[in-house]
Image (cartoon, rainbow, N blue to C red):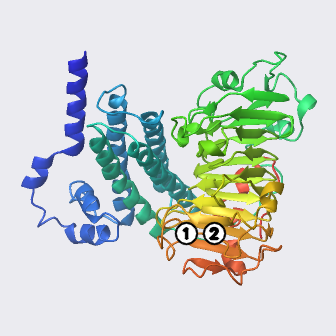
Amino acid sequence: MMASSILGLSVILFTFFFPATSALKNASFDHHPHLSSITSFCNTTPYPDACFNSLKLSISINISPNILSFLLQTLQTALSETVKLNNLFSNVRGSNNIVEKQRGTIQDCRELHQITLSSLQRSMSRVRSGTDSRKMADARAYLSAALTNKNTCLEGLNTASGPLKPTLVNAVINTYKHVSNSLSVLAKQVPKHGHKQRRLLGFPSWMSKKDRRILQVSGDEYDPSEVITVAADGTGNFTTITDAINFVPNNSYDNRIIIYIREGTYNENVDIPSYKPNVVLLGDGSDVTFITGNRSVDDGWTTFRSATVAVSGEGFLARDITFENTAGPEKHQAVALRVNADLVALYMCSVNGFQDTLYVHSFRQFYRECDISGTIDYIFGNAAVVFQASNIISRMPLPGQFTVITAQSRDTPDEETGISIQNCSIVATYDLYDNSSNVKSYLGRPWRVNSRTVYLVSYIDKFIDPTGWIAWSGNEGLDTLYYGEYENYGPGSATDNRVSWPGYHIMDEYDAYNFTVSEFITGYAWLESTSFPYDDGI
């Protein structure tokens, strides 16, 4: 059994790294009728060689290729290579050739590449069905999330060891070259902004009357026949949230599944996988309904896997709940809530932790009237995310540390991702206020070189350092990031002594509008369907 497994893995690795190499070497493309157009097209992508090799054998001599056909073929190549990558990681399971120094490394990669596969399929569907800006914006969001998956997998593999590690790393890098090329082409075809929408009045036609009613009431007003009830005292359908999630039907894309979580503290790590879409968690209030965990990197988990609540299912909603990681500042990275799912919204929730509290990993997200607290990089990730009317609360760090609110990880300018903090209050705990002369606090730092974060019309208290922002490593990214402030107020909002980086901007109204819900997270339709309030403009 062991010998056959190793043989099978060897075959997969050979196929992955040497696909039809002899055919490539023996083929001549000097007289290919579309060679010049393929070359010209590929020279505009981040990885021209990968692009050229994917197109020259695939574009038929009988068609007249255009940008759309090139894009579709590039996407198809990315899709095919991701299938191979998924098979590779599936066969790695249990192999002695890779040693996980952090629990969940290979599991993270498997799950993330599966989401990438789905994102590529959906991107192809959007591109094939038309080229209007809304469909193209969706495709771009999916591909941006896919590239984020690559980086997260590689971060985990960086802590692994064993003879198979270089093979896995190279496989991930080579596969995602095609994803990066696809996104680059798509980004050039879609206007970045300016696709202003007409606001929908009332509820969208696809939202059921049951959903409308349930999302507008609370607690004792729920009809037991229309919700799944979780109660720690045994008076509901389940005593744990995990059991309720397991009960939810898979792939329920047509209906929302409402889970009502009664008052209580639920000590569990909750995972809502990608095949559990449209899950809604409704609590009795963020002051009485708590979901807590204490996983951390120091205790051997990956940052991704440390989350108390992990959401990969599209269309997730939550209201009146506290998500908390109690590991403490001495345990370093310890996520309370991780979201790597599209069209997610939270209302009147609290997300509490210390370092890396809220992992806004990928896709499009919205937070309204939430309390989010932590010490270092406590809002981090590469989603396109808007926070409105929320309290952003910095906590006292360990001795010798500073506090920083955001660590945004946009990797390329082709990704329409970033953190937009609008009409929020940037405040601190009493002990941090008392020590603010000794502990410096910042609005953000660039996790990756194209990091993008803006603060719009928000109250900024006096504990924030006058420079506002801090570098991650030397001068890295200071000319390619985009950090902006627009009409903020409060004793910490003065911009006279802010950083002088090329990527820092005092924004005007037009720039600020590009980071509102309608422009930045293509908001109207899906936000209307949540029944959660939101501000449309600045």
Q: Identify whether 335 is placed above or below 31.
A: above
Residue under label 2: 195
Q: Nearer the viewer, residue 71 or 363?
A: 363
* Amino acid type at mark 2: His
Kindly state the secondary structure of the residue where label 2 is placed: loop
Residue under label 1: 471
* Amino acid type at mark 1: Ala
Q: Nearer the viewer, residue 149 or 126?
A: 149
Can residue 313 be seen here? The reply is yes
Q: Nearer the viewer, residue 358 or 300?
A: 300
Give the quarter of the image for residue 337: top right
How far across and down, in percent of the image, does residue 47 sit?
31, 63
Q: Residues within 10 Å of mark 2 (few under 14, many from 20)?
A: some
Can residue 129 be seen here? The reply is no
Q: Identify whether 328 is placed above or below 417.
A: above
Give the quarter of the image for residue 510: bottom right
The residue shown at (78%, 40%) is: 322
Quadrant assignment for the N terminus? top left
How far across and down, in percent of the image, does residue 403 sit?
67, 59
How far across and down, in percent of the image, does residue 45 sit?
35, 67
The residue shown at (92%, 29%) is: 220
Mark 2 vs mark 1, CA separation in Å:
33 Å
